[in-house]
Image (spheres, rainbow, N blue to C red):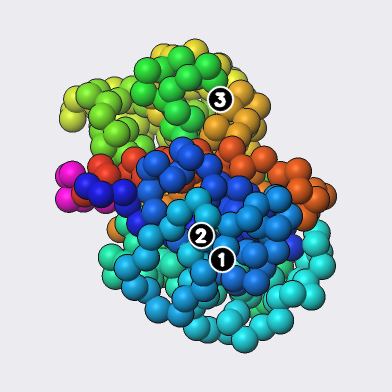
Amino acid sequence: MDRPRIALTMGDVAGIGPEVVARACEDPRVQACCRPIVVGNPEILQRAVRLIGSHAKVRPFDSLVEVESSRDQLDCWNPGGTASGVDLASVAAGSLDPRAGRAAYDWLVAATQAAQGHAFDAIVTAPLNKAALHLAGLDYPGHTEILSAECGVSCYAMMLYVPPGEAVRSPHGLGVAHVTLHTSIASVPKLLTIEGVAEKIGLVHDFLARIGVDRPRIGVTALNPHAGEESLFGDEERRIIRPAIDRFAGVGWSVDGPLPADALLRRAIGGEFDGVVAMYHDQGHIPIKLVARDTAVNITLGLPIVRTSPSHGTAFDIAWKGIASPEGMIEAIRMASRLARTKCEVGTSN
């Protein structure tokens, strides 16, 4: 496969998205693995290029034609839609602005639709801001839910994946997916179902198999401390999580749990598991971000397209100061390139 064509959505322009996209596009590791095409506003991208001290030229285009980016030229597609006619130049750095929220949404939808039409081999998304989305009248908790709606899928999951290296000891890296996602802690118990837990186990297994793990070792967290302590601290383990795990007893998969989350994540980071299914957002995010920092990549499982993103947010506190690290974006692009090549080889996609 030739270098895959990867769309990089600019995200919320009040945050660090434009800067980390501009820095990543010039990185030799990115140039070596893919053909990056920025989806966003070319004037904002050119401003980001100047911010990082680059002399690269931004080449805007309105239609998806065969293009080739290079270190001294950045191709930027500004698709038609609400965002294309909005004044984004006056959006203040680090501010909540409905114009930025709307633009981030429009660029994501356009990139997703183009990827479904095979114009892109994968998409990598710079961070958007949930509050800015809501100010724009868009009732979505984040990227994952927008992507699932645009792709028409109901079985999906957010995974944080850490490549093999110093952070985790599994030779295959470590993927942590979540049964519930952008919701309150109080709502988690009533959102858990046997079917939902089982679906996430299946998605994690399929992803690990796709990246070459012969017999994925998957650990499933408990919801409650000490795995409920024989239902003294809650009975979700007995009623929901254990029956979901039991569904895989006869298929030869290695699925262990429900295990106390603190013990399981420590064992997984130490190399005993290739994948983890966590019950809620922070249960999986906190330990992975602590050990992996910028190397963790957000991957959406269950989509007909490849989508990754860095694991950080918009970072309004350092936006447009020229100090944002592009490492998370670079890792997300490299992972997207890897998955795009795998998708081409096997003819399928998560």
Q: Position of residue 285 (x, y in %)?
A: 60, 36
Q: Position of residue 317 (x, y in %)?
A: 82, 50
Helix, strand or loop at label 3? It is: helix
> Magenta stretch: residue 119 in it?
no
Residue behind mark 2:
73
Q: Are marks 2 and 1 in contact (CB under 8 Å)?
A: yes
Residue behind mark 1:
58
Q: Is residue 3 visible?
A: yes
What residue is shown at x 22% (from left), y 47% (from top)?
A: 1
Q: Nearer the viewer, residue 339 or 271?
A: 339
Q: Position of residue 191 (x, y in %)?
A: 52, 51
Q: Is residue 345 left or right of residue 143?
A: left
Three-letter residue code for mark 3: Ala
Marks 3 and 1: which is nearer the front? 1
In terms of image quadrants, where is residue 147? Answer: bottom left
Three-letter residue code for mark 2: Gln
